[in-house]
Image (tube, grey):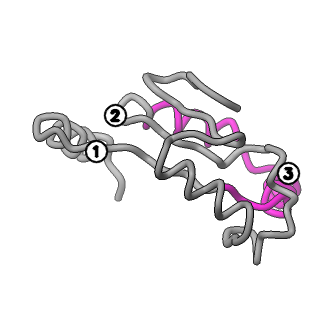
Amino acid sequence: MFSFKELKKVADYCKENRIDFKFIVPPIHETMWAYFDKKSLDTDKLLEYKRLLSWYAPIYDMEFESSIIGSSDFHDGHHFRGDVLQEYIKMITTGEGENVRVWKNGVIEEGG
């Protein structure tokens, strides 16, 4: 089971050893967002989870309702190619992108 205590150990180890530790969150297709709405899933809990995680390491987040979620580059709800893949690679390699938001210390600092 996931534990913030264990995550803190990992984050502390990375900091002490100068390891660049970050969370990468890929985008999901609009059908997944529709599913969340249909099932009345609490997306506020997802935001709270990201807020808490961002205290341990920055989150490079593409999992929000942005201009790419309806792209035909998605193979299914979670797998993508083409322009979405290129933007995802850009986010991973540079930390930048049009459809990226960066969480740090409990808040969204950039994008989104």
Give the distance between the C-alpha atoms of the residues marked 2 and 1, in whole angstroms: 8 Å
- In the picture of the structure, the residue carrying the numbered disc 3 is 37
Where in the figure is residue 27, as x and y percent of width and height? 67, 55
Q: Name the residue located 85 percent from the left edge and 62 percent from the top edge.
A: 71
| Relative height, residue 25 to residue 42 (above, below) | below
The part of the image, by quadrant, that contains residue 5 is top left
Residue 7: image tag: 1
Query: Are the two marked residues, 3 and 2, in contact with CB atoms closer than 8 angstroms?
Result: no
Query: From which residue to which does the magenta span run?
Result: 27-53
The amino acid type of the residue labelled 1 equals Leu
Query: Are the two marked residues, 2 and 1, in contact with CB atoms closer than 8 angstroms?
Result: yes
Label 2 or label 1, whichever lies nearer to me, is 2
Residue 56: image tag: 2
The amino acid type of the residue labelled 3 equals Asp
Residue 107: image tag: none
Where in the figure is residue 49, as x and y percent of width and height? 52, 39
Q: Name the residue located 70 percent from the left edge and 32 percent from the top edge.
A: 112
Q: Is residue 48 magenta?
A: yes
Q: Main secondary structure of the magenta part?
A: helix
Mark 3 surroundings within 10 Å by alpha-carbon count, few (fewer than 14), some (14 through 19), many (20 or more): few
Q: Nearer the viewer, residue 61 or 97?
A: 97
Q: Is residue 33 magenta?
A: yes
Where in the figure is residue 26, as x and y percent of width and height? 60, 56
The amino acid type of the residue labelled 2 equals Tyr
Q: Name the residue located 77 percent from the left edge and 70 percent from the top edge.
A: 74
The part of the image, by quadrant, that contains residue 1 is bottom left
Q: Name the residue located 79 percent from the left edge and 44 percent from the top edge.
A: 65
Label 1 or label 3, whichever lies nearer to me, is 1
